[in-house]
Image: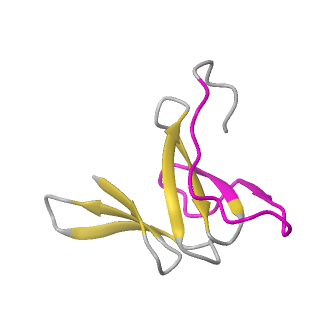
Amino acid sequence: LFVCGTSDKKILTWDTRANEIVQEYDRHLGAVNTITFVDQNRRFVTTSDDKSIRVWEWDIPVDFKYIAEPSMHSMPAVALHPNNKWMA
């Protein structure tokens, strides 16, 4: 599988063997900038030009955590702290 974030607000999971999209996540309102896998790859965190961070369960196309602040700038990146408890 290959996961990518797109400029048209989507996160896509591709099956590279079958050459087809197997999952689409489309809750962002702006271009998706980063995808960071966490929790032993069971979840992933995305950042976007819509000034939000979203946390997703693998294979479930609805975000279960949404963090946004309208006065912030868009989020070009996120990184997991070495203790796996924090993100920056």
Residue at far left of view: 17
* Image: 82 above or below 43: above
Q: Which of the 4 quarters of the picture holds residue 80?
A: top right
Q: Nearer the viewer, residue 34 or 18?
A: 34
* Image: 86 above or below 6: above
Q: Nearer the viewer, residue 73 or 16?
A: 73
Residue at far top of view: 83
User: Which residue appears at 54% of the width and 57% of the height?
Assistant: 60
Q: Is residue 84 magenta?
A: no
Q: Nearer the viewer, residue 52 or 23?
A: 52
Q: Which of the 4 quarters of the picture holds residue 28?
A: bottom right
Residue at far bottom of view: 8
Residue 41: x, y in percent?
46, 36
User: Which residue appears at 48% of the width and 81% of the height?
Assistant: 8
Q: Which of the 4 quarters of the picture holds residue 12?
A: bottom left
On the picture, is 87 further left or further right than 20? Answer: right
Give the residues drawn in magenta, as a range.
Answer: 53-81
Residue 74: x, y in percent?
67, 65
Residue 66: x, y in percent?
75, 57
User: Which residue appears at 50% of the width and 45% of the height?
Assistant: 36
Q: Main secondary structure of the magenta part?
A: loop
Q: Is residue 79 magenta?
A: yes
Q: How is the image coloured?
A: secondary structure
Query: Quadrant where the C terminus lies?
Result: top right
On the picture, is 58 further left or further right than 13? Answer: right
* Image: 44 above or below 84: below
User: Which residue appears at 57% of the width and 55% of the height?
Assistant: 46
> Total label count?
0
On the picture, is 60 further left or further right than 21? Answer: right
